Image (tube, rainbow, N blue to C red):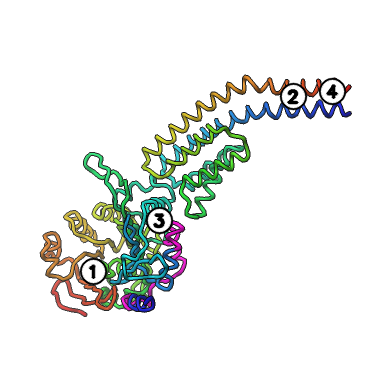
C-alpha cells in the first residue's frame, strides 16, 4: 500500500524533476523549522518522498497534510504515509504554537511586517503561510493572533529550467519584454527566477553578456530573502528590493540602480501598469508573471486588458502542469499573437 | 598557628555569607541592565531573540550574563525549544551558581513565559513589568544587605575569636 502511494506521488512530480535542486541541506532548512515531534513524524512517514514535498499543511484539530504534485497524503499514527486522511496525525494547538515559535526563532516581534502579510520566509527561501485572527488598527491588519493554520510552501530551485524558453526571449542580443502566464502552481516563479539568474550572469551561447537586473520581490518569493541574503541563486548582477510594493519598487530601482531589466511577480493592479509604462519610457526591459489560464481570460480583466492592448510585451509565455509543473504550452508574439513556439 | 587558622576560617565564612548580600544586589541590578538592552534590541532593531540574547550576554558581566548566554546558545542550536523553555534553563543555570530566592526565580521564569511569543508592544510591556519587579527585589536585597552584611562579617570574626578563646 505504502509503495503504491509513493509510486503514485512520484508520478505526479515535475517533468523537469531531474533538474530540481534536491540538495539535502535545503531540505534540512525547512525541516529545522518544524518542532522535534513534527520533524520526526515528517521524516519517519515521508522518508523517500521528503525531497518531492511541495506543501505541508498544519490546521488545528485536523490531520497533517503533505502535498506532492496533485496528491495529498497524511502521516498515519502508526507510521508511514497514507491517503486515508482520517487516519492521520491530528495537529494540536500546542503543535501549532511550538511550530510558530521555532520557525520565528521565538521572535514573533521581529516578523510583524511579515505576519501582517500572512507569511514568514524561512532559511532556504521557503515560505510559511499563516492564518489566524486579525488584529486591526485603524481598519488595517496590524498582526495575527490565535494562529489556526500554517502552510509550509517548499520552494524549489530548478537550475536551467529556462533554457528551452530563453531562445524565444532574445533577439539581436536584446532581451524582449516578456510576460509569463499560467494558473497557480505551474512554475511561473521558478521559471522567472531562473531567467533572472541566466540573464544576470550572461548567456554565451546566445551571445548575451550579463546585464544588471533589478528584482522587485514584493512577496519575498522569488529571491526568498532571509536576513538580507537571497536564498536562491539570482546571478551576479541582480539587485533585489525585498517586500517592497511592485510599482513603488520599480520606480525606486529605475531611479537608483539603473537596471537593464526589471523583473517582478504577479502584476495586476493599476499602479503596476503605470510603473511598467515608466520602465518602458526609461528603456528598461520588463519581465513579469501573471495568473491566468489563457489569453482570453486575461483580456477579461480590465487592468490586464489595458496592458495587453498596449502591446507592450513582445513575448507571452504560457505554462501548465500538463506534464508536471513548468510544462511550456506556447510562446506567442505579444504584438501579432502569432505562435513562435 | 591552629588558633590563627580557626580565626581566619570563621572570618572568611562570615565575609563570604556577607558578600552574598552584595552579590545578590549586583546580580539583580545587572539583570535590569540586561533587560534594558533587550528592550533596545527589540524595540529599535527588532533583532531576533537568539542574536539579541547573544549580544546582551557579551555586554554583561559576571553571573548575571548566564541566563542570557545559556538561552541564546539553546535557541541558536535550534533544538526545537521555545524561548520560555530556553530562558528557564538559563535561569536554572544561574540558580545553580547563585542561591536566588524563590521570588527572584519566579520573576525571571514568568518573564520567560512572555518572551518572544507576541508583538513588539507586548514584549515591551513584559520587559517593563519584569524590570519593575526586579527593581523592587533589588531594593529589598539592598535593605537586607545594609542590615545583614556587616553583621555576618562581624559574626564570622567574633565566632572565630570566641572559639579560639574557648580552646585556649
Q: Position of residue B156 (x, y in %)?
A: 74, 24
> Answer yes or no: do the residues labelled 1 and 3 have beta carbons within 8 Å?
no
* Residue sitting nearer the eye, B18 or B131: B18
Question: Mark 1 falls within which chain?
Answer: A
As drawn, the label of residue B164 is 4
User: Is label 4 in a helix, a strand or a loop?
Assistant: helix
Q: Name the image quarter holding the N terminus of chain A.
A: bottom left
- Give the number of the mark in front: 3 or 4: 4
As drawn, the label of residue A226 is 3
Residue at the extreme bottom = A341
Whether B39 is drawn above or below A21: the answer is above
Q: Are labels 4 and 1 on one chain?
A: no
- Give the number of the mark in front: 1 or 2: 2
Give the CA distance from mark 2 to mark 3: 59 Å
Question: Mark 4 falls within which chain?
Answer: B
Q: Is residue A49 left or right of residue B142?
A: left
Q: Which residue is labeled 1 in the image? A: A180
Give the CA distance from mark 1 to mark 3: 26 Å
Amino acid at each position: 500500500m505504502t509503495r503504491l502511494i509513493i509510486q503514485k506521488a512520484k508520478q505526479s512530480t515535475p517533468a523537469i524533476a531531474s533538474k530540481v535542486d534536491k540538495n539535502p541541506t535545503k531540505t534540512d532548512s525547512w525541516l529545522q523549522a518544524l518542532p522535534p515531534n513534527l520533524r520526526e513524524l515528517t521524516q519517519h512517514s515521508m522518508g523517500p518522498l521528503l525531497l518531492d514535498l511541495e506543501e505541508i499543511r498544519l490546521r488545528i484539530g485536523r490531520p497533517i497534510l503533505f502535498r506532492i504534485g496533485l496528491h495529498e497524503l497524511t502521516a498515519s499514527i502508526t507510521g508511514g504515509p497514507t491517503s486515508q486522511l482520517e487516519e492521520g496525525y491530528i495537529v494540536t494547538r500546542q503543535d501549532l504554537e511550538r511550530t510558530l515559535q521555532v520557525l520565528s526563532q521565538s521572535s514573533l516581534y521581529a516578523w510583524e511586517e511579515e505576519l501582517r502579510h500572512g507569511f514568514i520566509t524561512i532559511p532556504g527561501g521557503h515560505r510559511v503561510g499563516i492564518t489566524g485572527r486579525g488584529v486591526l488598527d485603524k481598519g488595517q491588519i496590524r498582526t495575527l493572533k490565535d494562529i489556526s493554520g500554517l502552510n509550509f510552501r517548499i520552494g524549489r530551485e530548478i537550475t536551467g529550467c529556462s533554457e528551452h524558453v530563453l531562445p524565444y526571449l532574445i533577439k539581436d542580443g536584446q532581451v524582449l519584454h516578456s510576460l509569463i502566464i499560467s494558473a497557480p502552481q505551474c512554475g511561473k516563479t521558478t521559471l522567472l527566477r531562473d531567467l533572472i539568474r541566466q540573464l544576470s550572469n550572461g548567456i554565451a551561447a546566445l551571445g548575451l553578456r550579463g546585464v544588471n537586473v533589478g528584482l522587485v520581490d514584493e512577496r519575498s518569493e522569488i529571491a526568498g530573502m532571509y536576513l538580507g541574503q537571497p536564498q536562491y541563486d539570482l546571478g551576479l548582477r541582480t539587485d533585489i528590493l525585498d517586500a517592497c510594493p511592485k510599482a513603488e519598487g520599480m520606480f525606486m530601482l529605475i531611479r537608483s540602480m539603473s537596471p537593464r531589466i526589471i523583473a517582478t511577480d504577479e502584476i495586476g493592479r493599476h499602479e503596476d501598469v503605470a510603473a511598467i509604462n515608466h520602465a518602458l519610457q526609461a528603456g528598461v526591459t520588463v519581465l513579469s508573471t501573471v495568473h491566468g489560464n489563457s489569453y482570453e481570460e486575461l483580456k477579461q480583466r480590465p487592468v490586464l486588458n489595458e496592458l495587453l492592448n498596449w502591446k507592450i510585451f513582445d513575448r507571452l509565455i504560457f505554462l501548465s502542469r500538463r506534464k508536471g509543473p513548468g510544462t511550456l504550452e506556447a510562446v506567442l508574439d505579444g504584438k501579432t499573437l502569432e505562435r513562435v513556439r | 598557628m591552629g588558633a590563627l587558622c580557626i580565626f581566619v576560617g570563621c572570618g572568611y565564612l562570615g565575609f563570604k555569607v556577607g558578600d552574598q548580600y552584595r552579590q545578590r544586589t549586583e546580580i539583580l541590578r545587572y539583570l535590569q541592565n540586561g533587560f534594558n538592552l533587550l528592550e533596545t534590541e527589540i524595540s529599535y532593531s527588532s533583532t531576533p531573540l537568539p542574536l539579541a540574547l547573544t549580544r546582551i550576554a557579551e555586554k554583561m558581566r559576571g553571573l548575571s550574563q548566564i541566563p542570557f548566554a545559556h538561552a541564546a546558545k539553546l535557541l541558536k542550536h535550534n533544538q526545537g525549544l521555545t524561548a520560555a523553555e530556553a530562558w528557564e534553563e538559563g535561569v536554572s543555570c544561574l540558580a545553580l551558581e547563585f542561591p536566588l530566592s524563590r521570588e527572584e526565580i519566579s520573576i525571571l521564569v514568568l518573564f520567560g513565559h512572555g518572551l518572544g511569543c507576541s508583538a513588539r508592544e507586548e514584549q515591551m510591556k513584559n520587559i517593563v513589568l519584569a524590570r519593575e519587579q526586579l527593581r523592587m527585589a533589588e531594593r529589598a536585597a539592598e535593605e537586607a544587605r545594609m542590615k545583614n552584611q556587616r553583621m555576618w562579617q562581624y559574626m564570622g570574626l567574633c565566632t572565630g575569636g570566641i572559639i579560639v578563646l574557648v580552646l585556649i
